[in-house]
Amino acid sequence: MTTHTRQFNRRSILSLGGCALAMTAVVGTPALASLTDDAIAALTGGAGAVEGGISITAPEIAENGNTVPVEINAPGAVAITLFADGNPTPSVATFKFGALSASRTASTRIRLSTTQNVVAVAEMADGSFQMAKANVKVTIGGCGG
Amino acid sequence: MQVGMAASAIVGGSGFGNWARLAAQQRLSQDQLLEFDTYGNVSLIHITDIHGQLKPIYFREPSVNIGVGANAGAVPHVTGADFRKMYGIEDGSPSHYALSSGDFSSLAQGYGRVGGLDRVATVVKAIRADRPDAILLDGGDTWHGSYTTHMTQAQDMVNVMNALAPDAMTFHWEFTLGTERVTELVESLPFAALGQNIFDSEWDEPSDLFPPYKMFERGGTKIAVIGQAFPYMPIANPGWMFPEFSFGIRDENMAKMVEKVRAEGAECVVVLSHNGFDVDKKMASVVPGIDVILSGHTHDALPEPVVVGSTIVLPSGSNGKFVSRVDLDIRDGRMMGYRTKLIPIFSDVIAPDAEVAAIIDAERAPYLPELTEVLGRTDSLLYRRGNFNGTWDDLICDALLSERDAQIALSPGVRWGPSLVPGQDITREDVFGVTSMSYGQAYRSEMTGEFLKVILEDVADNIFNPDPYYQQGGDMVRTGGLGYRIDVSKPQGERISEMTLLATGERIDPSHSYVVAGWASVNEGTEGPQIWDVVENHIRKLGTVTVSENNSVDVVGL
Amino acid sequence: MASGVKPRVKVPKTAEAGEAITIKTLISHKMESGQRKDDDGNLIPRSIINRFTAEFNGENVIDVLLEPAISTNPYFQFEAIVPESGEFTFKWYDDDGDIYEAKKKVSVA
């Protein structure tokens, strides 16, 4: 029988025997969350954002951390900025709504390096800021029944 | 027939008590197993998680099935003697043998094998004789799990199930046949292939191939059956085999579908689900308006439904061992009551249906020499179910350690696969019954101790996260050559400790690399021999298999 | 122009005046983040779509700034109002200076 050995490290895409087990980097880096706090402070001119009438819809568990569907809905917003607080660089995208936008709703697909919060900060028409968070789990997998 | 008041105004009854009382006689007849006072105006027949088992088998239910959070101590997380006590089941009775663990090997001698789709056909036909317009629903995990299913790319199961004439089906392991084959088979089906949570991954739109629901006009009323496929398909199984599809629980879309079918005149809403039992219970509490959830995936068998609000949730076991009959009284736009029976398919008691038996034999005939080849013999009970280990998995891990020259073995915590009782020959069919899949390559690689801990923590969270929506079903990854302690009450990252290399008794060093062999990787391009060949070689060398007690996982925090 | 870049959009062909319509867009693009290393350990340079805009008859609907955390083959879904018959113009701005464009006509009954 031939033997085949591969050296895996955490930065590799891994495939293991747990049942599923495919992963990129899984070890959490909570320190990164403060980068998002800093970015929000910069965005809001230090005023911060309150949780209010805006929402994020994202899966509980990402099917694939490289492409996680996220929907944001912020009635009354003029712009929405999206952050991923566990990514090495938290900024994801900024949506500015124009005159022919029918709703303050948009969906996209984003990269999440690990289990983390997706954070939306909406700039409202009156210049105030609102925010919403959704936790998305990025897992190496469980087992099929 | 037991009839009692359920939590809501629904009148419920379960036929379970009747055959439990036969215990004293230790005698069963087909008529007794099928006995049912036809009730209401609609009958559902549910079978799920057959996993390719055409013929009768032995199947031992788990002795370890831990519930967490709100489900601690709730069924199906009650096993063995505690389960029997909870339902008033006598020791040694047929119900004991069919539904719980304990004394399995000796009871198997008396009660024999279970399942066999020819026996299932007899039961289905008997129910249809009672109620000709009964709705037969297949909960999925049908086109996977055996030698012939692997060799025919599931044509064997499609042909046999078509003879049973189901009305609808939902899916999980079917997708591991790959998009092309699953599409070809689904397009050939003479019945509905349902999944409200099966979406096209590119545009995030409902898949054309899998309608969300089907409306049935039966018993003078309209019944909507909504399909719910396994939500975590691309995580628990290799997504690269079916990249065109996206899944998820999508309970908001489920709620929309319930509203839609009600608006179209459905007086009864049935969900044919492959969520797993705890996920179904949560979904019943979140989505209003579902009358019945026929629950699959986690392979639980309960003698009566669990009631959540005004929804009844019924799991119907696995591997062809059970068929559920659910009679409903649908009147004035709502479900007024129900009567259910989980019918155990005792293969020596229920006569095989000749027509379906002939189809099964025809499917198997080309492969009989390979199927029946004896590889060895077992002195031990070989079973799979259990949160942390099973003797089949112990044997598979030993095979990986020995045949792949590894320090540590990892084997997936799947819940399918029949049992073998002491003294049985082990055939190639038996090995395929616990290993068959489309991604069975046994890899060999190096992993650091730190990384092994990440794996154990991650898989543990998919089982012991207190929120059922984070539970993917299945059990803990089985380890060979590696012991550990798990505190199931802790959060992810803190459950696993005292990881030990069993060969030396030394603690696992986070920075040290270990040679690890495993199988069922979800990554494309995994290299290695097929796991069934690894296991076959190992069994041939052993001749007779004896599996000693496995104490390598220390479970705390219960 | 970068190779293999292909925009696709889904827009209804007809709409009611003032009605909110759903628009979906996809563009095939690798969205190289600039954070990955090749087999020799060298950083692979960033190459992404950094801006996406949608206009109808010259009037803005949505204007998106993209960072490297947007997935390969960027996808957007949003809602637009069409006051009269006309044409949507969608533009994707590549780091390399290229602009990819797609147009779709909508007729208002």
Image (cartoon, helix red, strand yellow):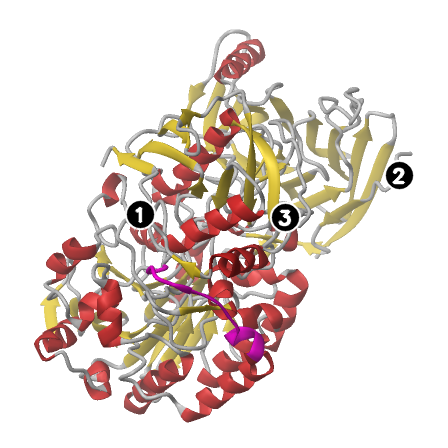
Q: Give the image location of residue A130, x and y in percent.
A: 47, 22
The residue to which callout 1 is attached is B549
- Is C53 placed left or right of A75 in the picture? right
Q: Residues within 10 Å of mark 2 (few under 14, many from 20)?
A: few
Mark 1 belongs to which subunit? Answer: B
Q: Amino acid at mark 1?
A: Glu
Q: Residues within 10 Å of mark 3 (few under 14, many from 20)?
A: some
Span shown in magenta: B369-382
Q: Amino acid at mark 3?
A: Ile
CB of mark 3 within 8 Å of CB of mark 2?
no
Residue C3's label in the rendered image is 2
Q: Secondary structure at mark 2?
A: loop
Q: Nearer the viewer, residue B394 or B142?
A: B394
The residue to which callout 3 is attached is C21
Note whether residue B263 is visible. Answer: no
Q: Nearer the viewer, mark 3 or mark 2?
A: 2
Q: Give the image location of residue B557, x and y in percent.
A: 24, 33
